[in-house]
Image (cartoon, coloured by chain):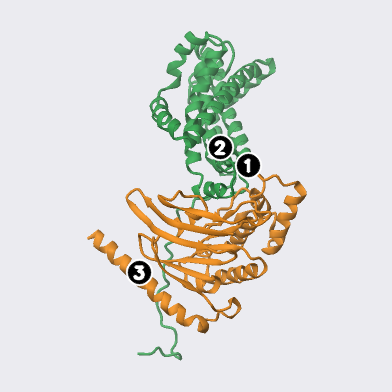
């Protein structure tokens, strides 16, 4: 199964956010989208999962969905998007309630993702009783319960502190080692992208175009800072140049 | 110059605290004491003949009047009649207000038509329409219930569409991303998300229902607190008049208490 992005562009009225995006998300890979603020990363993610209609181009799913898929394109949101009136268990159940699953099957699916994300002891807790990291774990558990073909993560760690971010990245690494889920991971953090992704797509400043696609050919277990230093330096220079140019353009527009 | 670690701490002034106030806290029992003091002062003024009992009957006179009306069953007849009208009018007005409010909140065309209409009609004093309702529905119960329902409808509709607007869009997008059908999104996301705003609207609409029932009962009603107050006023029975006012105040408190319990039960997640 592959996701093919073919000439996608998007504009919000007169503001062109994305232009001419050609890309494929390969089966089982983790693809990171990175770029300066406002480059259209989240817009592209919205288009990939069908939450936004592209102004130009299309996104195609090529090949068969993995067996048992309930919700092919499933998001993990930056702000967690948990229903505050539902418990952890009921928030996860939301992803399953409209599917024709038996009570036992639904229960088993919830138990499985609760165990996988270390939330089994918090199933009856309300979101307000959880830390930010725990809330995002609920978001991940809910997404996994929907048995996605492609997991679409929209800056899932950016609302969290550095320590929690690190712990959740370990969770993601463990998860991807256990389950081969195709994922598109939007982030503005280059360290996250290099630590987690198989390929990194660097978008230019607005309108977002693909500036560079880089394969991270260091095995995930061996991605130390030293091993990634060269790649980090090169990508950082690209992103910094784009961000600086974007700032200059904004200043010139304002003048 | 580097600081000297062995030097004694320099003398100086304590930094003044400036962060107090602007955080009002409830003082338990203060309201009860103030209320008791007010009634005691009022009773004392009456007992010392500082005020004319016809113009301002004493609390004891009002209590005696309440007791006498309760003993004959007259009080319960009036309260029951008013409550029946309030409940019917409030139920009709709330059902219609929620329906229209949700429709305005969810559908662009309804919003385009409904929002200016509601804004234009909301400020009209609904009691001014009672004569018209009497023409339409007759002098009996329906015109009174319709007046209350109309009065309840507007604040409920406004509270409902405001509450729907305030449901975080991110939650709706989340539900869409999981493929929930639109009706499920309304039932599982929009409705519970809008509940705090709707319940706040209930407080306002319940108060309006109480005001309107009294006004409506002052026009050709034999029973009801409004009728009782009007009749007592005509006969200069000011103790009975104020007894009616006390009953209204208690009704308001009861409604507020019930809504408070409802909020606490339904909004435990906040």
Give the side of residue B127 with respect to residue B86, left or right.
left
Q: Are marks 2 and 1 in contact (CB under 8 Å)?
A: yes
Viewer can see residue B189: yes
Secondary structure under the numbered disc 3 in the rendered image: helix
Give the residue number, with chain letter if any, for mark 1.
B266
Mark 1, other Cα within 10 Å: few <14 / some 14–19 / many ≥20: some
Q: Colour of chain B?
A: green
Q: CA distance from mark 2 to mark 1?
A: 9 Å
Picture quadrant where residue B74 is located: top right
Q: Colour of chain A?
A: orange
x and y percent of residue A111 in the render? Answer: 73, 57
Q: Chain of mark 3?
A: A
Secondary structure under the numbered disc 2 in the rendered image: helix
Q: Is residue A146 above or below residue B142?
A: below
Q: Are marks 1 and 3 in contact (CB under 8 Å)?
A: no
x and y percent of residue B240 in the render? Answer: 57, 18
What label sits on residue B199 in the rendered view?
A: 2
Q: Chain of mark 1?
A: B
x and y percent of residue B140 in the render? Answer: 56, 10
């Amino acid at each position: 199964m592959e996701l093919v992005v073919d000439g996608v562009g998007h504009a919000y009225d007169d503001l062109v956010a994305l232009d001419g995006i050609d890309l494929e998300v390969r089966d089982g890979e983790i693809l990171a989208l990175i770029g300066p603020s406002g480059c259209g990363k989240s817009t592209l993610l919205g288009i990939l999962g069908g939450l936004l209609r592209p102004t130009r181009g299309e996104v195609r799913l090529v090949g068969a969905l993995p067996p048992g898929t309930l919700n092919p394109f499933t998001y993990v949101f930056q702000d967690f998007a948990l229903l505050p009136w539902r418990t952890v268990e009921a928030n996860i159940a939301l992803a399953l309630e409209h599917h024709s699953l038996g009570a036992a099957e639904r229960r088993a699916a919830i138990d499985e993702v609760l165990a996988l994300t270390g939330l089994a002891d918090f199933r009856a807790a309300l979101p307000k009783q959880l830390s930010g990291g725990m809330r995002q774990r609920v978001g991940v558990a809910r997404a996994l319960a929907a048995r996605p073909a492609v997991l679409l993560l929209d800056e899932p760690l950016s609302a969290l502190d550095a320590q929690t971010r690190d712990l959740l990245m370990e969770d993601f690494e463990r998860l991807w080692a256990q389950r081969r889920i195709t994922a598109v991971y939007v982030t503005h953090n280059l360290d996250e992208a290099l630590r987690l992704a198989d390929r990194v797509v660097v978008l230019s400043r607005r309108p977002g175009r693909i500036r560079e696609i880089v394969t991270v050919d260091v095995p995930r277990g061996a991605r130390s800072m030293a091993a990634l230093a060269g790649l980090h330096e090169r990508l950082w220079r690209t992103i910094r140049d784009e961000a600086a140019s974007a700032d200059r353009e904004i200043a010139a527009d304002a003048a | 110059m580097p600081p000297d670690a062995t030097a004694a701490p320099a003398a100086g002034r304590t930094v003044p605290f400036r962060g107090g106030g602007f955080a009002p806290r409830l003082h338990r029992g203060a309201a009860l004491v103030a209320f008791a003091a007010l009634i005691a002062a009022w009773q004392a003024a009456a007992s010392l003949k500082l005020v004319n009992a016809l113009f301002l009957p004493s609390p004891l006179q009002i209590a005696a009047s309440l007791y006498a009306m309760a003993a004959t069953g007259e009080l319960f007849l009036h309260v029951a009649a008013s409550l029946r009208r309030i409940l019917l009018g409030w139920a009709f007005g709330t059902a219609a207000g929620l329906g229209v409010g949700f429709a305005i909140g969810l559908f662009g065309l309804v919003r385009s038509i409904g929002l200016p209409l509601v804004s234009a009609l909301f400020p009209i004093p609904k009691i001014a329409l009672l004569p018209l309702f009497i023409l339409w529905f007759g002098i009996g119960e329906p015109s009174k219930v319709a007046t209350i329902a109309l009065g309840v409808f507007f604040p409920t509709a406004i509270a409902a569409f405001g509450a729907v607007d305030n449901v975080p869009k991110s939650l709706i997008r989340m539900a869409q991303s999981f493929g929930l059908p639109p009706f499920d999104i309304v039932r599982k996301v929009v409705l519970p998300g809008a509940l705090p705003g709707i319940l706040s609207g209930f407080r306002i609409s319940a108060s309006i229902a109480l005001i309107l029932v009294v006004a409506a009962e002052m026009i050709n009603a034999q029973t009801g607190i409004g009728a009782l107050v009007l009749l007592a006023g005509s006969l200069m029975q000011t103790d009975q008049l104020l007894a009616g006012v006390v009953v209204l105040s208690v009704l308001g408190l009861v409604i507020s208490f019930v809504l408070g319990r409802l909020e606490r039960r339904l909004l435990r997640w906040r």
